[in-house]
Amino acid sequence: MDFNFDQKIQRENTHSVKFDGRRQYFGTTDVSPLWVADMDFAVPECVTRALQERINHPVFGYTLYPESIYQSIIDWFQRRHQWTIEREWIVFAPGVVPSLFAAAKAFAQEGEGVIVQSPVYFPFFSAVTTNNRKLINNPLREINGRYEMDFEHLEQCAQQGATLLMLCTPHNPVGRVWSEAELQQVLEISRRYDLTILSDDIHCDLVYSGVKHTMLGRLAQPGDKLITTIAPNKSFNIPGLGLSALVIPNAAERNAMKHMFETLHVGNYNPLSIAAFEAAYREGDHWLDALMQYLETTRDFAADFIAREIPQIKLIKPEATYLLWLDCRGLGMGDAQLRDFFVRSCKVGMNPGTVFGEGGSGFMRMNIGARSVVIINALNSILKNIPSRSNEL
């Protein structure tokens, strides 16, 4: 099947955060928006068809989750990830970020510790701190251009009264796909210290060739305290529709999350989200496969271009996601100066690494979920404006 990811789609004036939010975020609209993590590609035809069919019915009342949506999840994760999910394990949620906040409240009391692994997607921090839980950081280690978990330090963190570990897998922003051996170590530590794990697997489908993502839930044993967040939102470019799901094998953890959502009266979702969610998982395989080929070509081009033309910047080449984690420390700029350089001189709008916590200083996150010509033009603009006096590493 042929999919056109080079199609130019006008996103301005559609209330898009990525495009229409540029002035608020960057102070100007004159930047190529390569920041917030959605893509510029049209969603699969199966999704638009399902939405249109639902729109053709003129009533949009309170909506139940049909059994077919549960089955679409079960089938997708068996087919794509060899993970067997039971129907009763599935709990629907209003999104992954609300699930982070709910888990922090459900599995840690005020003052108790929640472990995060920076640099990481910034709601991991706010889910802890805004709920008056103790933030315990287990920083990732960069070793020869590759990020690894510090397991010795993770054990020390667990000994500080932690009750919850928030794991990002595949990891945003560094792009690591954790190996099965690494995930087994995480599980072993969680068992020793009775940790609950929230495993954010929202990027699990966006994995490049030659790499295998292992769902932590596939390795878990009965008794492990594990909540896995899943959604087609990133995979199929429907994050604005919001709906996600949790897979929670243990009844105690499942009931705790259900109770947390019930206390906020969060549970009824709109029929369009349900239609899109199910259609993506039921019929989206071919589109996703084509998307990953397109993204991999863009990723490889960017990696080669940066290594050849802009050696002052080091790319931590991602194994998954459509996000590039750029080490810009060789430019010799402070973080404020670095952000201003890319916005004002290069006219490229990216996320500054500092928002991802410790280990993010000197880095930028670039979203390559766009037409390849957009990425090529952005890289050429950076090359054209690189200060000649910057330090090459």
Image: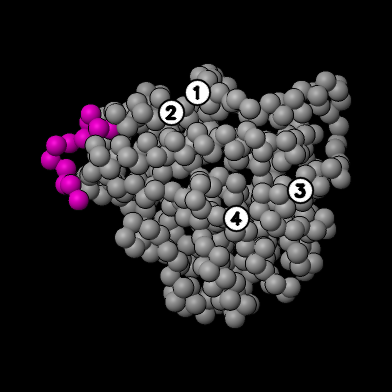
> Do residues under tags 2 and 1 come within 8 Å of each other at their CB atoms?
yes
* Count of marks overlaid on the render: 4
Q: What's the coloring here? A: one colour
Q: Nearer the viewer, mark 4 or mark 1?
A: 1
Q: Is residue 392 magenta?
A: yes
The image position of residue 281, as x and y in percent, is 72, 41
Q: How much space separates mark 3 and mark 4, taking CA atoms?
A: 20 Å
Secondary structure of the residue carrying numbered label 4: strand
Q: How much space separates mark 2 and mark 1, taking CA atoms?
A: 7 Å
* Residue in the picture at 51% in, 68% down: 182
Q: Mark 3 — residue?
A: 75
Q: How much space separates mark 4 and mark 2, taking CA atoms?
A: 28 Å
Is residue 392 at least partly visible in the picture? Answer: yes
Q: Which range is magenta?
A: 382-393
Work out whether residue 175 or residue 286 is closer to the camera in this orientation and state it.
286
Image position of 75 (left or right of 302): right
Q: How much space separates mark 2 and mark 3, taking CA atoms?
A: 32 Å
Which mark, residue 200? 4
Q: Which amino acid does label 3 sit on?
A: Asp
Q: Nearer the viewer, mark 4 or mark 2?
A: 2
Q: Which amino acid does label 4 sit on?
A: Asp
| Above-or-below relation of 374 to 286 | above
